[in-house]
Amino acid sequence: MKAIVIEQPGGPEVLQLQERPQPEPAEQEVLIQVKAAGVNRPDIAQRKGHYPPPAGTIQDIPGLEVAGIVAKIGTRVTRWNIGDRVCALVAGGGYAGYCAAPEGQCLPIPANLDFSEAASLPETFFTVWSNVFDRGRLQSGESLLVHGGSSGIGVAAIQMAKAWGATVYSTAGSAEKCNFCELLGASRAINYKTEKFRDVMLQVTEGRGVDVILDMIGGDYTSGNLDILAEEGRLVLINVMRGDEVSMKLSQIMRKRLTITGSTLRARDSAFKATVAANLEKYVWPWLTSGIIKPVIYKTFPLAEAAAAHRLMESSEHIGKIVLLT
Ligand SMILES: NC(=O)c1ccc[n+]([C@@H]2O[C@H](COP(=O)([O-])OP(=O)(O)OC[C@H]3O[C@@H](n4cnc5c(N)ncnc54)[C@H](OP(=O)(O)O)[C@@H]3O)[C@@H](O)[C@H]2O)c1
């Protein structure tokens, strides 16, 4: 099969198209003939050598999500049959013609979505579900601030939280991105390059603050995040793009009874991921089927042009998802 291989840690040019043997599915895995594979910011960190795949995962083929057709099934697979249209969360190996995935991490592709749309879902939807709804415990009627609202994660979080019945706010780095976040359902998107999110959020919530913040930025955002959390508020971290070490007023945590939490998805085991998949299928898939929430694809590239896809992602020009087509 054709696969994009990280030849050595480095820039986008280290992504090379090569011939690789097709993987064999384990007992509880399916082999997917990949039609489309989503690109995610963690793939960039992996390419640079900063985000090694867990042991037992293909080490040098990136790709955390795929959509395609089941081509083979392991001996203990019960749900899927050859020919089924599925999308799947994988721990690596997605930028390839074929990819093996645990059966519990596969979801049916809604009939109204094509392969590229379906491939754009798993990594961001699993991450948003497990952080905003599980760890962050967002309730209908509460409010959520999504930093990086135009990211792949952000466009999923805004739509899912809005569909859940929450009031959603976001930050993003341009007027165009902010407009898009508001079209998706944010009540107010804040251009962090021209406005201070802390001041705007205190103003729009009349000093009350927000219930949950989904933060991929960290660093100097942290003290502002604590300032704008409401009583019993939850700060959920999924990355620290502006820095890992922060200064903050710990007394705010006591005074407002705050929770600071976070997680990384890739290292979690298959049982955890299967539970998230089941929740997505139950609560979120009906919203996709009915069109209440929609995949947001910014651009697709042929698999062979994975380096160009990474350059685009690193430019941060995109809104929503970038997808590779095999
Ligand atoms: N913990 C987990 O399990 C998990 C899983 C998946 C993804 N993530 C993280 O979630 C984040 C979003 O992922 P994604 O795939 O949706 O990424 P993405 O589409 O590339 O979006 C990232 C966005 O973040 C904004 N940004 C703000 N500060 C930045 C900085 N210092 N460097 C780069 N970008 C910056 C940029 O938009 P602006 O124009 O608004 O600045 C950029 O478009 C990433 O940090 C990723 O590592 C975490």
Image (cartoon, helix red, strand yellow):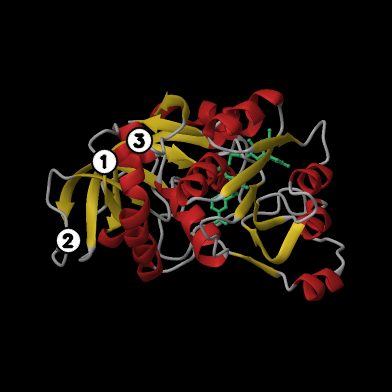
The residue at the far bottom in this view is: 254
Real-space CA distance between mark 1 and mark 3, rounded to the nearest whole angstrom: 10 Å
Q: Nearer the viewer, residue 64 or 129?
A: 129
User: Label 3's element?
Assistant: loop
- Answer few, some or many: residues within 10 Å of disc 1's Cα (few below 14, many 20 plus, some between 14 and 19): some
Position above or below: 322 against 198: above
Position above or below: 180 against 45: above
Q: Nearer the viewer, residue 299 or 261?
A: 261
Q: Are marks 1 and 3 in contact (CB under 8 Å)?
A: no
> Horizontal placement of 85 versus 325: left or right?
left
User: Label 2's element?
Assistant: loop
Ligand 1 occupies quarter: top right
Question: Which quadrant of the structure image shows residue 293?
Answer: top left
Q: Nearer the viewer, residue 240 or 201?
A: 201
Residue drawn at 71 percent across, 27 percent down: 174
> Horizontal placement of 105 versus 92: left or right?
left
Question: Which quadrant of the structure image shows residue 172?
Answer: top right
Residue drawn at 32 percent across, 31 percent down: 326
Check mark 3 vs ligand 1: CB closer than 8 Å? yes or no. Answer: no
In the picture, the disc for residue 65 is none
> Horizontal placement of 293 versus 171: left or right?
left
Position above or below: 301 against 155: above
Residue under numbered circle 2: 74
Residue drawn at 51 percent across, 53 percent down: 128
